[in-house]
Image: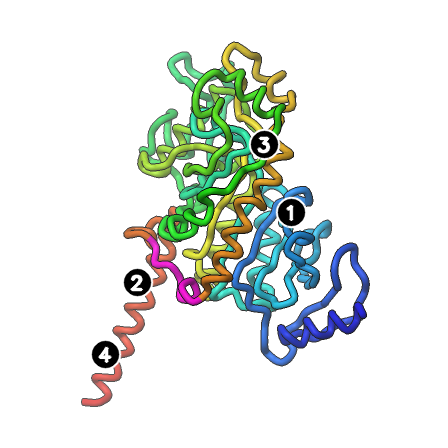
Amino acid sequence: MRFAVATAFAALVGLAVASPTPSNSGNSVRGNTGNGQKIAPKVFVFSMYDSEDVWTDRIALTQNVTVPGLSPLFPNVHCNAAGEICQLITGEAEINAACTVTALLFSNLFDFTSTYFLIAGVAGVNPHMGTSASVLLARYAVQVALANEVDAREMPSNWTTGYWLQGTSEPGTMDDVEIYGTEVFELNTNLREKVRPWLDGITLNDTTQAQEYRATFGYSPASDPPAVFYGDVSTSDVYFLGADLDNAFANITSLWTNGTGQYAMTAQEDNATFEAMIRAHLAGLMDFSRVILLRAASDFDRSPPNAAEVPAFLASHGGYPPSLENLFIAGNPIVQGIISNWSSFKGGVAPQDGWLHNADVNHTLELKKAAAKKRSMSRRGALGLARR
């Protein structure tokens, strides 16, 4: 039966089947381009580590597609029988995410040109923006730790942080800033607005322990029940904590977004994922305007008032178990909504004004469009001359 199911799935998506080796979950398929057809998911979910995979069992992602270059720990893409929904685990932190997402998008096993991507993982939360077990839909991802750093004990006495942007001379300025190209990405907020109503009325998971820990903050929104909210995500391989660093990275978020971004959650992968996506977009392999970033708050990024930072960081905040549940509670309505309303999503959702310029800090999507327009005009001019 395992061989029959795997063969049927391969026929559906146009893949050749290697030996149907049993796996831990689902049916194993080794894909290639075979007759030229590819799997064309409507929605693809990214998890960052195994506990965040709240998808494969619940929505029957039973077909495993082995993709060369994925994490050795997580070598398979998991898809449903129709090939409409797929999911993978990237591996944690920036290098794993960049390698996995690049391998996937450039694998030639899939057609991602109409696919929507949902990045769904847990993160630490800024208590001035949200609370534990809450769910964030982001506009920006900012690589806050791509900066100069001096130990705070050795910084100038008039500085408030040991972090300042590369190429600049002090914190809080963009003068002469040096840009690598991965510092900030902006997502399609019109897409965010289109899927947001599907989360109205959902009941987010919560625990008594999380409620008790929240109460120690004594201010809103930290002490409020979990909710869906908007804000932005920082990317850093280092787990940072404490109000001083949090405020420094909130200021860096503001600098890179011209004052429009609000640091709300801290994670490790998003800028790496997005840079790989930008490169795939430039190669015509996917559409970066079809990306949604959802993060659920597992813990707080700083201590409650009058508490020591390190003990608070090491303590259990009670938000981790419900945050994992809330990835599915908030994420699945988005996945199913796109599938159910495919006729209105297939052609894409036009992004906000200026997005093409701001999608990445080097404005590469805008430059590509301008170059394509210039080539088109040159071709038309050449044709006109030829006709004369």
Q: Is residue 168 left or right of residue 291?
A: left
Residue that label 2 marks: 370
Q: Nearer the viewer, residue 136 or 71?
A: 136
Residue bounds of the magenta highlight? 343-351
- Element type at mark 1: loop
Q: Residue 257 lies in what quarter of the image? A: top left
Query: Which of marks 4 and 3 precedes in the sequence?
Result: 3
Report the residue marked by disc 1.
54
Q: Secondary structure at mark 3?
A: loop
Q: Amino acid at mark 3?
A: Asp
Separation of marks 4 and 2 at Cα, in angstroms: 16 Å
Neighbour tally class for label 1: few under 14, some 14-19, many 20 plus, Cα within 10 Å = some
- Residue 206 bears which disc, if any? 3
- Whether residue 240 is situated above or below residue 13 in the rendered picture: above
* Residue 322 percent location from the top left of the image: 61, 35
Distance in Å between CA atoms under marks 2 and 3? 49 Å
The reply to whether residue 276 is visible in this rendering is no
| Residue 74 appears in the picture as rendered | yes
Q: Earlier in the sequence, mark 2 or mark 1?
A: 1
